[in-house]
Each structure stands twice: as structure tokens, then as C-alpha cells.
Image (cartoon, rainbow, N blue to C red):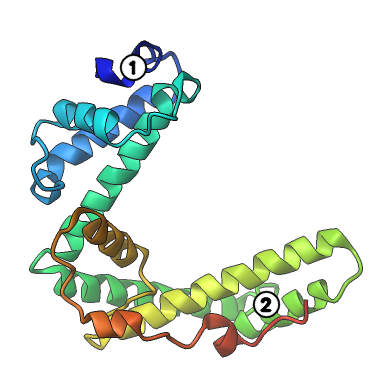
Amino acid sequence: MAAAGAGRLALWREDHAHHGPRLDRALARYDRYAQARPPDWPAVPVAAFARFVTDCVSGLDGPEHAMAYDVQRFNQLTRQMSAYAHITHPDNATRAKSRARRRDAARALAEQVNARLRFRLDADARLRTAAQLLDSDHPAHHKAGRAIWAGAHREADRELRDRRVSAGQDPWPLDGRYRAAVRYAERWGLPTPSWSPRERETPRRSTAARLGQPQR
């Protein structure tokens, strides 16, 4: 820890509402998914954090970044460990199908409720509203239109991901957890998650192509 510099070490538990709890969560997450840690890293969470600070923090990162900056990046590392552990779990496909079925049921229920509420817009109506806002001359309308369009993209990606999972297909690259697991495996030289690399390299039809491009 001392190798990281006195300025960073002095802020190990700096007085902030989020920094200490974030470190506690990261250490607990590392301990929970220690089986997915980088090769040759210690199993003890605090020792792993010390290893991260001394080996993975650039010497150019001066004390102005403080320990909170290191904690944030260590927290990101443990999140990737969690993603890798989940994706490589033997029951991952079964669990993913169960989650997809629950989301499909919730989505169907939401559509039934929205159909009874006339002020709630369906997907096509939201896209038309977004296009109208993007055609406006007011910057505030453009911002709202882009937000609606981005939400439609995310929802379309989630629906396509759930359909692929329910059909027993790999949801790459629609699932953020899968992407995090792949980045983690590539960075630390771990076995790549079980789907075919060829499928990962094949470009999919973009969401914009499926939804249609906005005019602006």
C-alpha cells in the first residue's frame, strides 16, 4: 500500500459518504467471487486491493486522484469478476432462460396495463413522438427526442436478448454482463466464456436498422 504513495494512503478511509461503503462492497465482492480472481492474485481481499494499487495504478496518477479513484477502479474490477463468475457458472444458461421468461411475463403484463391507459404510448407511438421532437427547431425538444430514441434502442436490445436466450442462443453482444466477462477474460488471460469467438466477431444487425434511423 505504501508503494502507492503517502498521499493516496492517507485517504484510505477518507471522510466521504460513498468512498468507504464502496470499498467495503468491492472487498466483499472480491471475497465472494475469489474463484474468478486474476491469475496468481491473493485470495484475501485487502491483499488483492494492495496488489491492485501497487501493480495496476499508473505512476502518472498522482495524489490528486486520491484513494477514491483507486477504489472506483478496484470496484470495477470486482464487478467484472462477478460477471465472469456468473457467465462461466455451469447453470448460467438455465438461470438466464428463467430470467428471460420472467421479464417476458412482466413485459406482457405491462403491455396489457398500458393498453388500458390511453395516455401511455406504445413503442411505435414513442418512436413517432421522438421523430417529431427531433424535427423541432428547439434544442430542448432534440434532447427529449434523443432520450426517447435511446430508451427505444435499449428496450429493443433487451427484447432481442431475451428472445435469443429463451431460444438457447448466445445473447452476445446484447448482454452487458457477457461483454464485461469477455473483457475481463481477455485482459487477464482467462478462458473465454463458452460461446464461439466466430459468433462474437460477426456483426449483428444494428438496433438503428431495426428501428429505423431518426431524421436528426
Q: Residue at (92%, 69%) from the top-left corner?
A: 137
In what element is the residue under mark 2?
Answer: helix
Compared with residue 143, is residue 13 higher up or lower down, i.e. above or below?
above
Compared with residue 9, is residue 124 higher up or lower down, i.e. above or below?
below
Q: Residue at (34%, 85%) from the top-left corner?
A: 163
Q: How packed is label 2: few (under 14 Cα within 10 Å), some, or many (20 or more)?
A: some
The label shown at residue 12 is: 1
For the residue pair 211 and 48, the one nearer the viewer reads as 48
Residue 210 shown left or right of residue 148 in the figure: left
Image coordinates for residue 208, horizontal then vertical, percent:
59, 82
User: Given the current orientation, which residue lies at the most extreme front position?
Assistant: 59
Mark-to-mark CA distance, 2 and 1: 47 Å
Residue 73 shown left or right of residue 129 in the figure: left
Compared with residue 192, is residue 112 higher up or lower down, i.e. above or below?
below
Q: Which residue is mark 2?
A: 126
User: Residue 100 lies in what quarter of the image?
Assistant: bottom left
- Kind of residue sitting beneath label 1: Trp
Residue 175 shown left or right of residue 196 in the figure: right
Q: Of the two numbered discs 2 and 1 on the same chain, state the one appearing first in sequence.
A: 1
Image coordinates for residue 10, horizontal then vertical, percent:
36, 10
User: Which image quarter holds the C terminus?
Assistant: bottom right
In what element is the residue under mark 1?
Answer: loop
Residue 149 shown left or right of residue 17 in the figure: right
For the residue pair 210 and 72, the one nearer the viewer reads as 72
The label shown at residue 125 is: none
